[in-house]
Image (cartoon, rainbow, N blue to C red):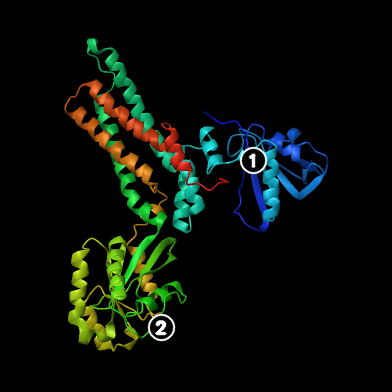
Amino acid sequence: MIPHDSIVALATPSGAGAIAVIRISGQDAITIGNSVFKSTKNKELTTQKTHTLHLGHIMDDFKTLDEVLVSIFKGPNSYTGENTIEISCHGSTYIQQQIIQLLLRKGCRMADPGEFTLRAFLNGKLDLSQAEAVADLISSDNEASHQIAMQQMRGGFSNEIAKLREELLNFASLIELELDFAEEDVEFADRTQFHDLLNRIEFVLKRLIDSFAVGNVIKNGIPVAIVGEPNVGKSTLLNALLNEERAIVSEIAGTTRDTIEDELVIGGIGFRFIDTAGIRETEDVVESIGIRKTFEKIEQAQVVVFLFDSSEFKVSGLKLKVELEKIKNQFPLKPLVIIGNKADKLKEIEIENLKSEIPEILLISAKEKLGVEDLKNRLLAFINTGALRNNETIVTNTRHYDSLIKALEEIKKVKFGLETNLSSDLMALDIKEALYQFGMITGQVTNDELLGNIFANFCIGK
């Protein structure tokens, strides 16, 4: 059911500011707005053209609440597809609340989270994946996540899925037709063309599924654990990366007893750095808990940065290699960056010896901020940004990923059925399930619970 009542919400962040925008959408939105608006030129909002601006005052009977600008958007040419007005008022929280309360008394109700975008979806202005991209766009905090959200909101992902679904639907219709003429034993669907289509769909689905590995880390940030023995400069490195004194730095071993996290954007990609407690044998109960948390953070991290004091390598090189092997064996699939800190203290011969002992080593001086840019470039190299640079479709939504996995399973069943001459009625069932999963992504197949879960995560004014 498409609702027709009028909803109201603050569309700008709550709190005081220079201006605030209050949004109304619904069948009677313009009429309700007109009932509280007095134009400086005595205009009636109900008679004005769409996409126009009007200066005037919001009146509560004879009391003036504020001088405002009102924007008119008549359906279906609005964001929601309904009559919509936006009131730009001064940003006082008192003024905001007074205007909203007045509109509630005039017949509006408070919008639910994401209800404006939900109405846009219900009125055919956006499909479901585009609607979800709106939330991603609002929450994007780096260039890469913004780029992906914009591409999805413009319909890049939807178009790929819709094209595959349409082609599969055409063949499904022909197979259904064959079932109606089962006694005549005729084939309407060309099996060779159908096999080619299934191969193409399988290829696209696999590409989209594989892109989720990149999309997920771009959307949520890439967790990087900085680990090593106490007092090797982990906190100094974190401060150098962030360019601020985020972590306490001390000569006393074991200063960091809990994990410290902060985010940094490198080359348009968000990285979440985690400074962990130094790994060593200790009888200190609190420090022991911190070391246990260190290994938990390594488990959660996408990349591990192992830091050691390069000036002490002569003395503790064997112990260091044992610790390094322990991490490699415990986490064999995690990318590992081995960093020798305090390289400014090394002689040329010592640098050459270190590089021969550990060829993949990166030498830096966190205190002097030497080699920090090289570390950033090394971290960026772990992320496959080729698809991003080529503006390819990248999947970032877990719900979409789940539907793509299920659709691929069904396509594989259809392929197997085609290759083993399975009866058309059984193949038709698998095709219907694949079509269902495609529809779940774009919203051609929905239910109230699904929509409730998706839009509950939106902010109120969107």
- First along the sequence among labels 2 and 1: 1
How far across and how far down the image is residue 154, in percent? 49, 43
From the viewer's perspective, is 42 left or right of 350?
Answer: right
As drawn, 58 above or below 353: above
Q: Indicate the quadrant containing the C terminus: top left, top right, bottom left or bottom right.
A: top right
* Amino acid, disc 1: Ile
Q: Is residue 391 left or right of residue 421?
A: right
Mark 2 near mark 1, Cβ–Cβ under 8 Å? Answer: no
Please determine whether, in this image, residue 442 is positioned above or below residue 393.
Answer: above
Question: 396 or 191, which lies in front?
Answer: 396
User: Which numbered dot is residue 24?
Assistant: 1
Callout 1: 10 Å neighbours few (<14), some, many (20+)?
many
Rendering coords of residue 198 (x, y %): 28, 33
Q: Which residue is mark 2?
A: 368
* Residue 150 visible in the snapshot: no
Disc 2 vs disc 1: which is toward the camera? Answer: 1
- Mark 2: amino acid: Glu
x and y, in percent, of residue 243 in the image: 46, 75
